[in-house]
Image: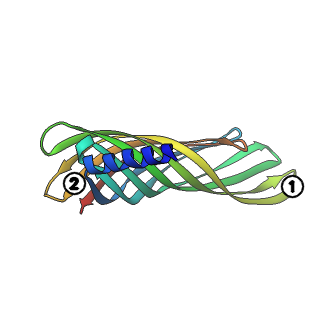
Amino acid sequence: MKRKLLAALLGLDLATCVSAEPIVFVETGYSKLNVKVADVKLNDNNLAFTIGGGYRFEDINLRLLADYSYYGQAKGSYKDDANTFGTIKTKVSGLGVSAILDIPADQDLTTYLGVRFSANHIDYSENGKDEGDAFTEKSNHRKFGYGLLLGARYTYSRNWDAHLGVEFNNIPKFDNVRIRQFGIKLGTSYRF
């Protein structure tokens, strides 16, 4: 009971010391999706987007965000020998949470560094022939991943910011599949 009371008082004290501004944001940009399935490497460039919202704690230069991100798709073909060949297609998206540290450069320009954790959805399909027999494999996977964010944002009016950033997202290896995503995005956010 004493621990719960202490935690509640500390939480109340933090809430009174730090003002939180709700924000919403949208980003779009370039995404390079690298997928490795066994010995087959798929590398595709895509248009990617992110939409989300959260809170900005200006007193401590911190943003806590939740988002939906579409990373894109990667497709390619393989041929092992004369009797085995096929095509592979993956499509990746994720729901994520981020903690971003803002580092003010001047009154309107702020650089940032953040970490992102995500629950990712992977659609996987493979069509081919093995020893003359045709096959089709389709599966959906849900895997957790992590990433890094780095960029700058510029405040161009009282409630509006523009931001440009780079990101790296990694989904740990599963079932002989490894997925990594690199991106550069331009976006805007609105503070209420």
**Labels in figure, total:** 2
Q: Is residue 48 visible?
A: no
According to the image, label 1 marks what residue?
Answer: 132
Tag 1 secondary structure: loop
Q: Is residue 64 left or right of residue 191?
A: right
Residue depicted at 39% across the width and 60% down the height: 52
Provide residue 5's location: percent of width, then percent of height.
Answer: 45, 48
Q: Is residue 103 left or right of residue 9?
A: left
Query: Are the residues flagged by discs 1 and 2 in contact, CB closer than 8 Å?
Result: no
Residue depicted at 52% across the width and 42% down the height: 146
Q: Quadrant of residue 156?
A: bottom left
Please name the amino acid that badge 2 sits on.
Asp
Q: Quadrant of residue 40?
A: top right
Q: Height in image: 190 above or below 145?
A: below
Q: Is residue 130 visible?
A: yes
> In terms of sequence position, does the residue under pointer 1 or pointer 2 come before the other?
1
Q: Is residue 97 left or right of residue 179?
A: left
Residue depicted at 49% across the width and 44% down the height: 2
According to the image, label 2 marks what residue?
Answer: 161
Q: Quadrant of the C terminus?
A: bottom left
Q: Is residue 138 left or right of residue 134?
A: left
Please name the amino acid that badge 1 sits on.
Gly
